[in-house]
Amino acid sequence: MENIDFNFGLDGENGEEDAEEQWQWEGRNATVFLIDVAPAMFEKDAAEEESDIPFIVAMKCVHASVCRQVVSSDQDLTAVVFFNTLNCTSASQQPSTSSTALLATFPHVAIPLPLDRPSADRVLTLESYLQDGRSKVTREFGGICEDASLGDALWASSNLITQCKSSLSGQNVLLFTCRDEPHSSNAVDLAKKAKCKARDLDDAGIDLELLGLGANFDASKFYKALITLDGQAPDRSIAGASSARLEQLQERVRRLEHKQRATGRVPFTLATGLEISVGFYTSISTARKPASVKLHRSGNDLIKTITKEYREDTGELLMTSDFCKYQEYGKRKIKFTVEESRELNKVYPTGIELLGFKPSSAIKAFHYVKPASFLYPDDKNIKGSTAAFAALLTRCVARDVVPIVRVVPRTNASPSWAALLPQEEVLDDDGCQLRAPGFHVCYLPFADDFRQLDMTVGRARASNEQVDAAKSFIKKLHFRYDPSSFENPDLQTHWRNIEALALNRRDLEPVTDYTVPDYARIRKKTQELVSAFKDLVWPSGYDATAAAAKRPPPKPRATAGIAPAAAGTPSVEDMARNNTVEKLNVATLKEWLSARNIKVTGKKKPQLVQDVYDVLSA
């Protein structure tokens, strides 16, 4: 039997990391990069002499996307499809061994990279197209032309996704082209076919996104009736469809291919009989190195660990239902099955319940206890959730109030109370969304989270002149903070080492540590102000940089036995005879058990108390 822990996760002693929400598996993202390889894609724009040709710009975006997936989402799938090639199969690809052999072929449409997870070989293939460009396409597919049907290209892209056997949560086709009109002016049937296939993609839940290359790209000539970006009206989405600069295009690709995944979907009870569906999303989280895995020494195959437990006396295999937990009360072990112990944690049903409203000024910065989540409506489970959610958000912003709610994000999770901070939608100049509308779920502390501090001890207080001097140089150091400008140098070094190993490279790009302050610039901007502050605060001749006097080494502790209890204080043995060991604090219990060579690491107070009784009853 296992000692059950009736700590419901409210004091953080059970080691539960609620801040690190577990992803709810909804499937992989599948992205098809559909790239035009017509002759115009290999010609430089006269207005952009310093930029690369459109084909290289598109391939750089694809290469950056695949490299990013290796780090952030290596389970997602990508494919590359060329249209306007002479041949539909690669000269170096055998039909019998090709992973695209079961797919229908279309004239002038080729699949250099089928739908698959990112790998070192795929990265090297993309780099070969970046290096050789047109010659690589001609060598592999016999040449280029302008005779392809965009409808066939969309059909081939759709087949890659629909014939995928994996469970998919997001399906995207990103179309790269520099030509305003993919067909000749008299090819009316081809234009109708392309529009028909675009509707088929939409019906299948596949998002078709246009990434026009070149400053002079005019999507209104043909693609206005074909493409609607981000579910917005065509006129608004066309404004952001043409990207001249590589940085802008890569940022648009990152936004389009990255679909935020919900960590969970729960009902939101606004009133009795009124429920909507919402999803939890992680606003920001700490990036960590991937966990280590065990590999077989012969073939580097992943080793799967399976644990089985047997009865010691009979050797019988034990199932999960054979185990039970217990809580000791009054020297009796009260047993619970695993299912019963789970039910004990279900204090409230899963979901969010609205309790009331507070002015936004009532939420203080010191109320922070753990990272916030983000709340967004979900119409898939309950129709009309978006409309009700939008109405609640609009009125909260108008009245400057925050809803106070009770949150149970998943089954068996500890209940939390939170404030929902409203956030309005923010768009950039191109109409792209910078901040989504929704609520930030700011978890609130419990009463025992507030410490009672004794502030009666006298202390020196700074004068107004000293405070103003400190403010003057601190304001000089202010700058606009952007988290994306400061990469973790440890993580960057780790991934570049893996990249060099996987791609068999010896030369590594040096990692620039942007977290190191620019001390020369700081001294230049604040030297006089800091000197004035020192003169006001520190006495004359004081050197703040001088080494402080070292503390004497601590005296060694006595190891022979335990110090006797103070006069009038009952010993552990006396308290055990009176069944009052539970009143001792954890430090005393650990010290008493450690002196008797009893392991105390990782144990909680109920286990320590039980160990004391076991030692004295032996």
Image (cartoon, helix red, strand yellow):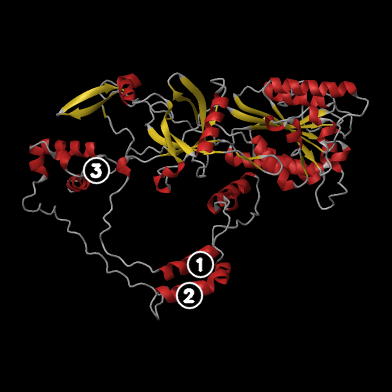
User: Which residue bears the numbered disc 2?
Assistant: 532
* Mark 2–mark 3 distance (CA, rounded to whole Å): 57 Å
Q: Residue at x 91, y 24 (%)?
A: 187
Q: Position of residue 93 (x, y in %)?
A: 77, 30
Q: Is residue 22 left or right of residue 340?
A: right
Asked if residue 234 lies left or right of residue 527, the reply is right
Q: Residue farthest to the front?
A: 399
Residue ID at (7%, 42%): 574
Q: Is residue 441 left or right of residue 511?
A: left
Specify the amino acid type for callout 3. Lys
| Residue of label 3 | 599
Q: Say if mark 1 contacts mark 2, CB within 8 Å.
A: yes
Q: Secondary structure at mark 2?
A: helix
Amino acid at the residue labelled 1: Ser
Distance from Cα at disc 1 to Cα at disc 2: 10 Å
The quadrant of the image that shows the N terminus is top left
